[in-house]
Image (spheres, rainbow, N blue to C red):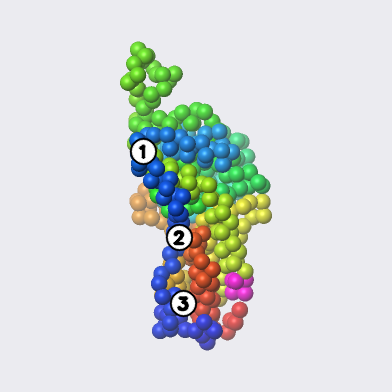
Amino acid sequence: MAQPSKRGIPAIEGGKPIRASILPYGRQWLDDDDKHAVRRVLEGDFLTTGPAVAAFEEKVAAYTDAKYAVAFANGTAALHGACFAAGITGGDEVITTPMTFAASANAVLYTGGKPVFCDIEPDTLLIDPTQIERHITVRTKGVIPVDYTGQPARLDEIREIAQQYGLIVIEDAAQAFGADVAGKKIGSLSDMTMFSFHPVKSVTTGEGGIITTNDDSYYQKLLQFRSHGITRDPARWKNGGGGASWYYEMHELGFNYRMTDIQAALGASQLAKVDGFISRRAEIAAAYTEAFRHLKAVSCPVVRKDVRSSWHLYVIRLREGLLAVDRQRIFTALEAENIGVNVHYIPVYLHPYYQSLGYERGICPQAEKSYEQIITLPLFPAMSGQDVQDVIDAVEKVIHYYRAKGFYG
């Protein structure tokens, strides 16, 4: 093991931590405008099923250049709604990536479908379009690409494959609100696109999600699905209703997945600041990449030239053979420096539940290899310059200390 770097001995080895308190990997940033927006709803007549939700949907649709937007209680509910609207049912297969949170695949199971896992590109860690086609069968109904870390998947190639085989593309852009491809905003490039508004995302509503689409049929199905499968629209009634103002009809077995006006008001306020949030995220990511260029034991994220990432996450990879310890030791050492690192993600099919369904280890070797190497560093717009420097100092300190014997890069 090499001598301690100029930053000293890691805290886990008895040295002094870089920080006195923990820096989380992600955190919301709320200002007075956000609080006033929520307070106005709390002082008004509608806490839910009021006008704030529709107003938020209109703003999201306009921002993403989509025709429609349908808000949900959370991103998982939104994905469930998209799978329902797409008609995914028992026996249908949907191709997706294992390098994602479990919800991407779970939503397929909710509607009776079967997730089929496709391996990832070794550099971007996004679903590999060149491997999608070999997973297509007569039962394949759709593809759920995931915009991992905020970088859009190769949507042009995925759409081309989908059109060739008559598949529906449901883009899981939970991490990519505000991202774009060749200047075109994510949200209008797939049949349906899901965004999440969890507190660590670019825009937060506390919990919340939304589906954007340009298809009127999907739009109508999504509206009913999120509210028990019920419609109050006289134009869609099947039994007449006799013109009664109180009348409504349930057409499908839907769910109570509605977003509240409280959430929507917060989201609308946050949306006004999203471009600034993303710019700050990009600044932090650029600072990390510049600082870590000299660390040969670390690989920085690869971003394609034709896209603008929303930089939801900054994920480094540890290079095999250049460190004297494994990922777990590096992770624990960074935690001891009070850097709130994380790992995104455990490949979905390695979870015990998916193993019980018959998914086997080894089906996506690139995803499994990458999982063993990755560490997520803190990245959120409210980070101060000192916070960013603390992360840089901690990574340099730990990596230098644990570099392999005889390796000085």
Inspect the image, locate mark 1, and give the three-letter code of the amino acid beneath it.
Gly
Could you tell me which secondary element the residue under label 1 belongs to?
A: loop
Question: Mark 2 and mark 3 in contact (Cβ < 8 Å)?
Answer: no
Identify which residue is drawn at 35% across, 35% down.
Answer: 45
Earlier along the polypeptide chain: callout 3 or callout 2? 3
Q: Which residue is situated farthest in the top direction here?
A: 242
The outermost residue toward the bottom is 3
User: Against 217, is 205 above or below?
Assistant: below
Q: Residues within 10 Å of mark 3 (few under 14, many from 20)?
A: many
Residue drawn at x 63%, y 44% as measured from the top left: 184
Disc 1: which residue: 44
Q: How many angstroms separate mark 1 from mark 3 (CA)?
A: 47 Å
Left or right: residue 240 compared with residue 56: left
Q: Does residue 355 appear left or right of residue 68 in this picture?
A: left
Question: Of 346 and 392, which appears nearest the observer?
Answer: 392
Say if the magenta span includes residue 94: no
Residue 77 position (above or below residue 27): above
Q: Which residues are magenta?
A: 291-295
Q: Nearer the viewer, residue 148 or 397?
A: 397
Q: Within the image, what quadrant is residue 227 found in?
A: top left
- What residue did someone put label 3 on? 18
Badge 2: residue crowd in 10 Å (few <14, some 14–19, many ≥20): many
**Marker disc for residue 11:** none
